[in-house]
Amino acid sequence: MEQIIILGSSNAVAKLGQENTHLFIDTPDKKIMVDCGDNPMAKLTAIGTTINEITDLVLTHFHADHLGSLPLLIMDMWLEKRQMPLTIHGLEYTLDRAKRLLELFNWQNWQNMFQVEFNVIAESGSQGFITGKDVTVSALPVLHLVPTIGLRFEFKNSRVVTYSCDTEPCDNLYRLAQNADVLMQEAAGESKGHTSAKQAGEIATRCHVKKLVLIHYERRHGEETLVSEARKGFMGEVVMAQDLMRV
Ligand SMILES: [Zn+2]
């Protein structure tokens, strides 16, 4: 059965047992990783899969906590003798910088390097930029400190999951989250380019979301405190994302 596994749930400052926010979407044909912070290799092993099963990598934005491990991931795929092509999706701003990062490691000269395709997501967003048998993934630009996309996953069983990525509340986030079964909403705290737990609850209510998962949060703020903040604005179920949690 298709599912989303939270590989990391932390804000930018990872903790022992709580890595930077990144996700794995497991469907029969599409194995999609969203962002690439910390140590996805170990996390994928922990859930019984491997990096070379990944078909698509979505980079939501060019911040180190979201793609700092990209060169290591690509190198490990190569060391593990990957044959299958990999498609990396992102905004032009993100992919340009990601390519430059990889070039610093001379990846163009690695022997028997597998094929990497770059799929540029338009600045205005992209409907169905990944279309698998069981899942369709769409993106819209959200409001963060650098160009960033939020994501909406529509599954064949008609379930919808939204991942806000890093953003403050904005119209495109509301569009992405509209009537979602699950909203995985960043809750780094109220500041420019980010959202607080209280605002996350308000977004969930406004968008008629069934379940709210707070992610990309600072554990030191206290998980119970964050849940009660979110509940001020939302009557539905609220849970804190944890590493290796399945959605
Ligand atoms: Zn960010």
Image: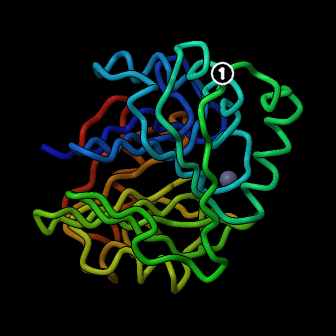
How has the structure been colored for display? rainbow
Taking the spot 40% from the left edge, 72% from the top edge, the residue there is 128
Q: Position of residue 107 (x, y in %)?
A: 78, 29
Q: Position of residue 150 (x, y in %)?
A: 51, 66
Q: Position of residue 18 (x, y in %)?
A: 49, 27
Q: Which kind of residue does numbered mark 1 sit on?
A: Asn
Location of residue 229 with respect to 217 vertically, above or below = below
Q: Is residue 231 visible?
A: no
Near-viewer residue (18 or 24) = 24
Near-viewer residue (111 or 62) = 111
Near-viewer residue (83 or 95) = 83
Instruction: Determine whether the residue tagged by mark 1 lies in a helix, strand or loop.
Output: loop
Taking the spot 85% from the left edge, 44% from the top edge, the residue there is 100
Residue pointed to by mark 1: 112
Relative placement, left or right, of 46 versus 66 is: left
Relative placement, left or right, of 218 versus 132 is: right
Taking the spot 26% from the left edge, 45% from the top edge, the residue there is 29
Residue 133 quadrant: bottom left
Residue 178 quadrant: bottom left
Location of residue 72 with respect to 103 vertically, above or below = above
Q: Within 10 angstroms of label 1, few (less than 14), some, or many (20 or more) residues?
A: few
Taking the spot 24% from the left edge, 78% from the top edge, the residue there is 179
Location of residue 107 with respect to 211 vertically, above or below = above
Q: Quadrant of the C terminus?
A: top left
Relative placement, left or right, of 86 versus 178 is: right
Near-viewer residue (162 or 236) = 162
